[in-house]
Amino acid sequence: MGVRVESEKPLLVYDGDCDFCRRWVNRWRRAFRDRVNVAPYQSVAASHPDIDVGRFRESVHLREPDGTWTRGAEAVFRALAAAGRRWPLRLYRRVPGFAPLGEGLYRLVAANRPALTGVT
């Protein structure tokens, strides 16, 4: 019997059926280089039954090597920080109002992904 070893890299999970999501993930991959794993929820959801599939459809999720999950804007900023781009996460954590604004904008964009696909 084999032993399953967790990756030492964070895993960013996104909606692989969403054109908007695929485009943005492809942009982020360049920033992530090889420091963050990326996968559509359709291929990893069964391995993570602790997250409802409906939540995966709503927003990106980041699973860190210690098992911590985050979602939405925070997940994006934490993934970028893992790849060495720390300033967005610093703003998120330290600037009053930045976190709620970031999450609100994330939800607005997420709710309008089909309409925004052509814009991006």
Image: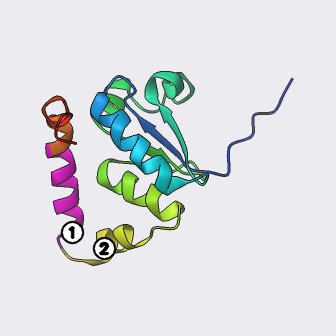
Asked whether the beta carbons under mark 2 and mark 1 sit within 8 Å of each other, the answer is: yes
Can you identify the residue that label 2 sits on? 91
Residue at image location 37% in from the left, 67% down from the top: 89
118 relative to 90 in the view: left or right:
left
Q: Magenta span covers which residues?
A: 97-108
- Image side of residue 6 versus residue 48, left or right: right
- Image coordinates of residue 74 in percent, x first then y, are 34, 56
Q: How many marks?
A: 2
The quadrant of the rendering that contains the C terminus is top left
- Membership of 100 in magenta stretch: yes
x then y, percent, for residue 116: 16, 37
Residue at numbered disc 1:
98
At a point 30% along the width and 77% down the height, the residue shown is 94
In this view, 14 is above or below 94: above
Quarter-wise, where is residue 24 in the image?
Answer: top left
Q: Give the residue drawn at x 16%, y 52%.
A: 105
**Quarter where residue 103 is shown:** bottom left
Q: Amino acid at mark 1?
A: Phe
